[in-house]
Image: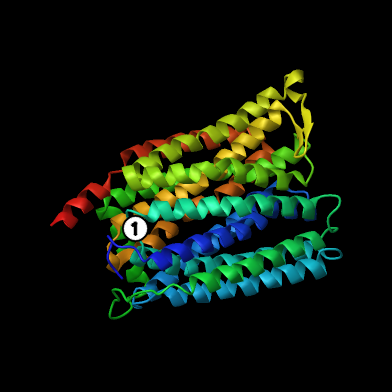
Amino acid sequence: MNNQDQTDEKAFLIGIINGALWNIVTAVIQPELVLSAFILRLKNSIVLTTLPFVVMRLAHIISSLFISNIAETWSRKKIFYIAGGTFRVITLGLISLSTYTLGTNWPNLLIWLFLALLGFYAAGIGSSSIGFNEIIAKTISFRRRGQLMGLRGFFGGLVGIASGFYVRFMLGDTGPTFPYNYAYLYATAAFFLGCCVFSFGLVNEPAGHANLKRTSIYLHIIKGIGIFRTDRNFKFQYLNNLTQSMAVIGPVVYYPYATKLLEIPESFVGSLLILSAGLTLPMNFLWSYIGDKHGNRLLLLINTFVFTLSPTLILLSGYLMRIPLATVGWNTKLGLITPVRICLISAYVIFTMTNIGGMIGNMNYLLEIATEARRPSYIAFMNIMLTPAAVSPLIGGVISENLSFQTNFLLSLILSLVALYYAYRLGEPRNQQIIENDF
């Protein structure tokens, strides 16, 4: 099946199951929370806590360049998903083993070994994402891709709540001691990632367009730059992605900010995962409804606007700390809740919520504007040209450590407002696509 107006129902169902399993993986190795807490436990440095995010982005971007160049000569791309996924399972297993054996006596060695292995893990994502998106484009109608992503997010959110309780137990006082608690988390991620790879490998991928021969990497890059110059929608989607990705300098230091200034315990990471998963559940259906019924251009515009609320709220929490009554709270099963912590929780929930909306909108918008022959290049070059944003979390860590958290959060807000402007400039490709299909 390779018709944009038809959907392979088996692929649709497997895609939902795969999404639920994948959400367990993302919850237990969340870069902004779990991995940040892990690095901070090994070494008390705000800058170092941003490195997992930076390393994963850079490795993903670089691998996308080479894999997309190879993938355009293959009529079926599922092998890239399976190979990349298997490689990532092995890498997570090695991360778990090294954490278990080195974490107690060689923490400095573990930090750099962990970051190196995390880079290899993210490089596998470059291969898997190309295979995954290609299969989705071939088997799911553009009119139902938002529904698929919404259902993936909904059921993923349900298991995400359970994963949050699991993470809270692992990082709490009654869980395993450090570093074994993190080693078990990484082993859990490896197991469920293996389940993801197996489940999605069951999808029957139809043959598609394949280039007769590979171009050189140089020509591949030149052709990619050409997309940016000739496709107006691609250009503004890229600029929206770039500025919003740079605005992540705020969210990547939410955890260090919470521990150093708000004095929250390490186990509160699990509570944040529980709250964000639970509160974002209904948003999955809203995002998918907007994308399917009204177009992904509107989805990206609304999503970017909502994202601006995250740095706004975290800035507000800093000002509330100066008011004595704002630090008074009440004890709950999720820990002490105060107006300041409510701002923190809301900021993180909005960040998570817009991550989901952005994933749905960006992927589906890109699949709509890309031709089948150039689809791997569109996907890869969208990632490759986001390289400048890959180091922005590191800049956020430096600003937070040497100036202030508030300065960093203000810069995050400004960048998110610029991203909103570029989202407004996007065109709606679906109208043109519908006209073409009518003929």
Tell whether 10 sits left or right of 435: right
Q: Nearer the viewer, residue 22 or 107?
A: 22
Q: Nearer the viewer, residue 127 or 9?
A: 9
Q: Residue at x 86, y 58 (%)?
A: 177
Q: Nearer the viewer, residue 42 or 338?
A: 338
Residue identifier under label 1: 367
Residue 398 visible to the viewer: no
Amino acid bearing label 1: Leu
User: Which quadrant of the figure has residue 344?
Assistant: top right
- What is the basis of the colouring in this image? rainbow
> If the image is split into quadrants, where does the C terminus sit?
bottom left
> If the image is split into quadrants, where does the N terminus sit?
bottom left
Task: Residue 377: give x, y in percent of width and height.
Answer: 35, 65
Task: Residue 313: give x, y in percent of width and height.
Answer: 59, 30
Residue furthest bottom in the image: 213
Q: Is residue 323 above or below residue 271?
A: above
Q: Secondary structure at mark 1?
A: helix
Q: Residues within 10 Å of mark 1 (few under 14, many from 20)?
A: many
Residue furthest left in the image: 439
Task: Residue 438: give x, y in percent of width and height.
Answer: 15, 55
Tell whether 48 sits left or right of 425: right
